[in-house]
Image: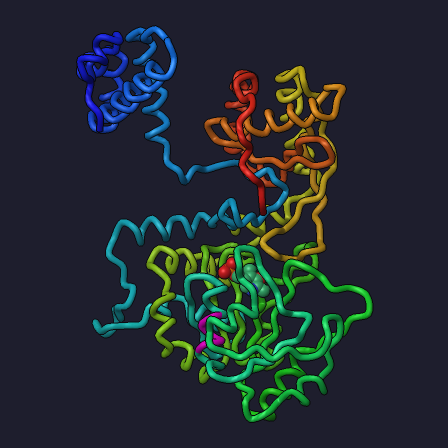
Amino acid sequence: MTTITSSDLRRGLPAVDTLLAHPTLQAACQQYGQRLTLRAVRETLAQARTQLAQANHTAPTGAALAEAAIARLSELARPSARAVFNLTGTVIHTNLGRSLLAEAAIEAVVQAARHPLALEYDLDNGARGDRDRLVEKLLCELTGAEAATVVNNNAGAVLLALGALGAGREALISRGELIEIGGAFRMPDIMQAAGCELREVGATNRTHAHDFENAISERTGLIVKAYTSNYAITGFTGSVPEAQLARIAHTHDIPFLVDLGSGALTDFVALGLPYEAQPSDAIAAGADVVTFSGDKLLGGPQAGILVGRRKAIDTIKRHPLKRALRLDKLTLAALEATLRLYRDSDAPQRDIPTLALLTRSETEILATGERLLPHAQPLLTDFEVTLAPCASQLGSGSLPVDRLPSQALVWRSRATTRRQRERELRQLERALRRLPHPVIGRINDAALQLDLRCLATPDEEALFLGQLAQLPNLYRTATQQPNAPQSE
Ligand SMILES: *Cc1c(COP(=O)(O)O)cnc(C)c1O
């Protein structure tokens, strides 16, 4: 940390204590504390010093420095993990934290955070227990499995299952299922990391039962099926049904692993949504282990869930990676509360936010849009704002080709050249991100779209509307700056 030197004083910069004594900074001390305010003051003076050294500026006034220090202070005090509006049109957005938790799950997290928890403690017998016990019975009841265990995420679940059941041996998988999920999860790499030897079977578009039968040898340790959750192979295609793969595996006394990816625990068609396979289907078909995510279609916290036969799950639980990938108490508490809703709630599609957002009707979204439109239209003269139909995606590799009809606020630049239109759109995007509760939209078809599916509660709507008045000023000041790359 640099200090004020006599040359600073010659340049006209105040000493740290002098600036700190400014009335607005004294008030800030009350709100933010001495420590953070002092830091902001020091950093502000250091920046002023650099600027003075670079150019032949005159020193800023005390009031200007105090204002700069206050701005820095509010920036320093702002957490990096900020709540945002996800109006991207992708409901389960990995970059935006995937599922929102149900109220019951939030309550469970708060309790687990605030109090000691019977986590690995059997209250009936006063003895040491197993933390999986918190969710195992529920998972078995909801999927029809004999046993269950949980880890940090589904990538970890797949790695663990492969390592525990197939290390040192061949794992057979169809060529059409060598999936890559975003963020460097690639089936061939995961198999290698788990110590399995990948043995591709069949062709990219078609794989037959005899392909698997012919590939089996004394080196085979495992048959794997992975759901191609973020792409679809269409046309002349064929894959081996799970029940048949299970029969082939069991004839040769080897386990059958299914990586389901998304973990829908309820019948999606009954909710008016596109069909989605459930873990119970794979269990009923004879899978030894089924893995899926806790925070995709299940709508819970980030977790990797493994359900299946007792023998295979016991082998998995004994593997050292299980301990390395174990869940913490907050996640376990949230997961238990979410699973209880699937078992006990009269309407999981109302109580579990992910399901509520996915099943939200276009009529309701349209009504939200009609309330917002008159407030959005007059804000920026550079743009024409309309309400238009759009299509939401489920996201996170769930149901890759299906779209849900929705409505978006669409901001179209009135500029005459393409370059100008693009610049204004980027500027608008940036201004929306700089709102106190940042708004994340999507540029599509030369317009900025705010899909309103995930602006679903009156509180959120009020919050969104309440900050809109700040947009014109942010738009004016949001000129050229490198734009963060966007990905899903
Ligand atoms: C999403 C997904 C994964 C990874 O799950 P995470 O919970 O993101 O770790 C693995 N396999 C499939 C098929 C998936 O869809």
For image coordinates 76% across by 19% down, the residue present is: 416
Residue 264, visible in the rendered structure: no
For image coordinates 35% across by 67% down, the residue present is: 324
Q: Residue furthest right?
A: 236
Q: Can you tell me which quadrant of the image ligand 1 is in?
A: bottom right
Q: Please state the extent of the stretch shown in magenta in the rendering.
A: 159-163
Dividing the picture into quadrants, the one containing residue 41 is top left
Residue 235, visible in the rendered structure: yes
Dividing the picture into quadrants, the one containing residue 186 is bottom right
- Residue 169 sits inside the magenta stretch: no
Q: Position of residue 352 (x, y in %)?
A: 52, 51
Give the main secondary structure, helix, strand or loop, of the magenta stretch. Answer: helix
Determine whether 144 is above or below 40 in the image. below
- Residue 160 sits inside the magenta stretch: yes
Does residue 60 appear left or right of residue 342 in this picture?
Answer: left
For image coordinates 28% across by 18% down, the residue present is: 45
Does residue 92 appear left or right of residue 205 in this picture?
Answer: left
Q: Position of residue 197 (x, y in %)?
A: 53, 79
The N terminus lies in quadrant = top left
